[in-house]
Amino acid sequence: MDAAKYQGVIKRYFNYLPVGKNTPVITLLEGNTPLIFSGRLSEFLGRRFKVYLKFEGANPTGSFKDRGMTLAVSKAKEEKQVAVICASTGNTSASAAAYASRAGLKCIVLIPEGAIALGKLAQALIHQAVVIPIKGNFDTALSLVREISANYPVRLVNSLNPHRIEGQKTASFEICDTLGRAPDFHILPVGNAGNITAYWKGYKEYKAEGRIRRLPAMLGFQAKGACPIVKGRVFKHPKTLATAIRIGNPASWKKAEAARDQSKGLIDAVSDREIIKAYKMLALEGIFVEPASAASIAGLIKLKQQGYFKQPGRKEVVITCTLTGHGLKDPDIAVKSVRTPKSVSPDVKKILRIAKIKK
Ligand SMILES: *Cc1c(COP(=O)(O)O)cnc(C)c1O
């Protein structure tokens, strides 16, 4: 593909999406994100294993939400809506605010008070969304926007909006187009469960079209303090430092279970400690993600340690992991999870001692 001619996911996958020639395409050239081979993780899993990281932090607003938002906002514009609305742990609002601005639509954002990462809040604010912090958690905010969008000419752009899922499924298309096959396993974090639903839909459609021969097992990871699907019960007070997956009652719960069961995969949980460990490990490979994204890698490590990937045979095993959002979204956590440097006097010897550099 000629990069200079890249026009975003709607144009690239036009025939796979619910769009027509009258759809105004609102795009920031989202998608076409890097699929990065990880030598270290591949080696950690052993010979035959190839681990690839789909770095969705490279999207225009820094998360995979842009794939769904380009479609949701284009359709809202086509269908003459005056505004879009969402509840958000941060990235949905950042993306909605950017795409709504581009489309000339008003954007209304309900966020759980005090529970949203600084970078994401900055994004919604600078794009001039109407940001309304709610005394309550994400699930409360979501039920409010559902009520408002059902009764007013305001389009809901949470992943309950089917256009979001349609746009997000393009990530699996890209993976298959790049690898020339489907992975054997696909690992991703699960919050509201829209993305696991979207990936699974994408893989199934590519199989139905004959573009791939087999389907991956879908392996989803929630945070231990917010793992309703794993436990089979709503979490009234979800708790995790991975704010993007701090969700106690996922909207796409049933669809995530269907993806898990149809693909013979699993949905499990990882602790905040495991998440931060994976987060720092990725950083040492040059990749800066937000904590929720590291749940994929924490999950990969956990499964490897449990012997999950012990498969008979000699065939190559391909694992893809979605890294959902960029680390710059949540700089507070980055700074808190490492030792902060102390100032020193301007002295070459001191600097060399600290940097451990010798002649
Ligand atoms: C939205 C989001 C998730 C969770 O995705 P769901 O579709 O809600 O399961 C995970 N990580 C990041 C960075 C996100 O923005």
Image (cartoon, grey):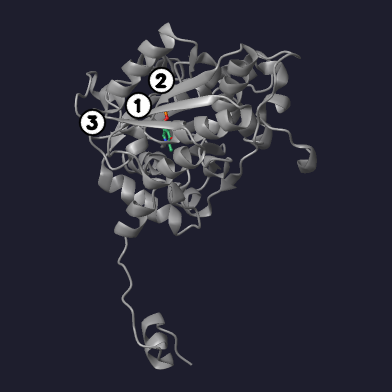
Q: Earlier in the sequence, mark 3 or mark 2?
A: 3
Residues tagged 3 and 2 counted as in contact (Cβ below 8 A): no
Among the 4 quarters of the image, the one containing residue 28: top right
Tell me the quarter of the image containing the N terminus. Answer: top right
Residue 193 lies, in percent from the top left, at: 40, 23
Q: Is residue 342 above or below residue 174?
A: below
Depth check: 263 or 69 in front? 69
26 relative to 261, above or below = below
Q: Residue at x 24, y 27 (%)?
A: 136
Q: Amino acid at mark 2?
A: Arg
On screen, residue 339 above or below 282: below
**Which residue matches tag 1?**
267
- For this view, does 193 lie left or right of residue 228? right
Asked if residue 143 lies left or right of residue 323, the reply is: left
Nearest to viewer (mark 1 / mark 3): 3
SS state under label 2: helix
Helix or strand or loop: what does disc 1 sit on?
strand
- Kindly indicate whether the residue at mark 1 contacts the one at mark 2 (C-beta within 8 angstroms): yes
- Tag 3 or tag 1, which sits nearer the N-term? 3
The Cα atoms of the two marked residues, 2 and 1, are separated by 7 Å
Residue matched to label 3:
238
Q: Foreground: 118 or 29?
A: 118
- Of circles 3 and 2, the one toward us is 3
Q: Secondary structure at mark 3?
A: loop
Closest to the observer, 265 or 246: 246
The residue type indicated by label 1 comes to Ile
Q: CA distance from mark 3 to mark 2?
A: 22 Å
Q: In the depicted view, which residue is nearer to us: 168 or 45? A: 168
Q: Position of residue 83 (x, y in %)?
A: 52, 20
Circle number at residue 260: 2
Q: Quadrant of ligand 1?
A: top left
Confirm if mark 1 falls within 8 A of ligand 1.
no
